[in-house]
Image (spheres, helix red, strand yellow):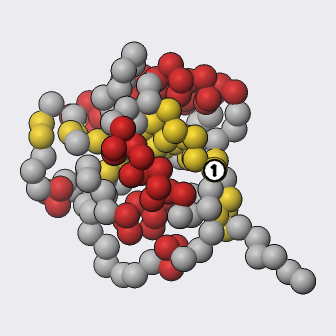
Amino acid sequence: MTRLNDPNSISKPGIADNKSTSRSSAESKKFTGTILLIDDDEVGGQTLEMMLKTLGCEIIRVENGIDALSVANSMPLDLIITDMCLPHMTGMEIIEHVRTISQTTPIFVITGFVESLLKERSEELRINEIFLKPIPMKILIEKVSRYLRPAQSATL
């Protein structure tokens, strides 16, 4: 495993560089959908959950692979966000299983490390985005909002 000190040094397409070139309107819009968030780090997971809740979506947060597969097997999901290093199984194993259920559910990986295996298999497993921790809220919201449906405005 290689620890990347400079998140901007990643050149593979689909891997976020934690830079944003324009202000996103997604920060003020609301979206519908269910996001499965898999992160065993209590503080990091809670932070990501709070960031995602600003979108108005349902967030299901679990801390290990067994619970993640239980959720993934029991309901349709609009987005899955997973860490790679988790109890009971790796993020890669979770992604492999999810792909047997759904080839189209968007999957984001948020990790402190980018393994060569992850980069090599990202296309094969249809990983939509790979982020290095810590990820700024603006970047996360901007990327997530691309995969969710806008909430319908109430009409009188």
Q: Secondary structure at mark 1?
A: strand
| Residue pictured at 46% horizontal, 64% vertical | 141
Q: Of 114 and 54, which appears nearest the observer?
A: 54
Please state, as top left, top right, bottom left or bottom right, where the C terminus lies in the image. Answer: bottom right
Residue at point 17%, 61% (across, down): 8
Please, is residue 19 above or below residue 13 in the view? below
Residue 89 location, x and y as percent?
Answer: 39, 19
Residue located farthest toward the right when viewing the structure as drawn: 156
* Mark 1 neighbour density, 10 Å: few (under 14) some (14–19) many (20 or more): some
Q: Residue at x 58, y 47 (%)?
A: 59
Residue linked to disc 1:
58
> In the picture provided, is 119 more to the left or to the right than 66?
left
> Eyeballing the image, is 15 above or below 93?
below
Asked which quadrant contains residue 105, the reply is top right
Is residue 55 or residue 2 the one in the foreground? 55
Image quarter (top left, top right, bottom left or bottom right) of the N terminus = top left
Type of the residue with mark 1: Glu
Q: Is residue 13 visible?
A: no
Observer able to see residue 118: yes
Q: Residue at x 61, y 30 (%)?
A: 72
Q: Give the image location of residue 65, x and y in percent.
A: 46, 23
Q: Is residue 75 left or right of residue 138?
A: right
Q: Position of residue 46 (x, y in %)?
A: 42, 46
94 w.r.t. 144: above or below: above
Q: Position of residue 92 (x, y in %)?
A: 38, 28
Q: How many marks?
A: 1
Q: Nearer the viewer, residue 130 or 11?
A: 130
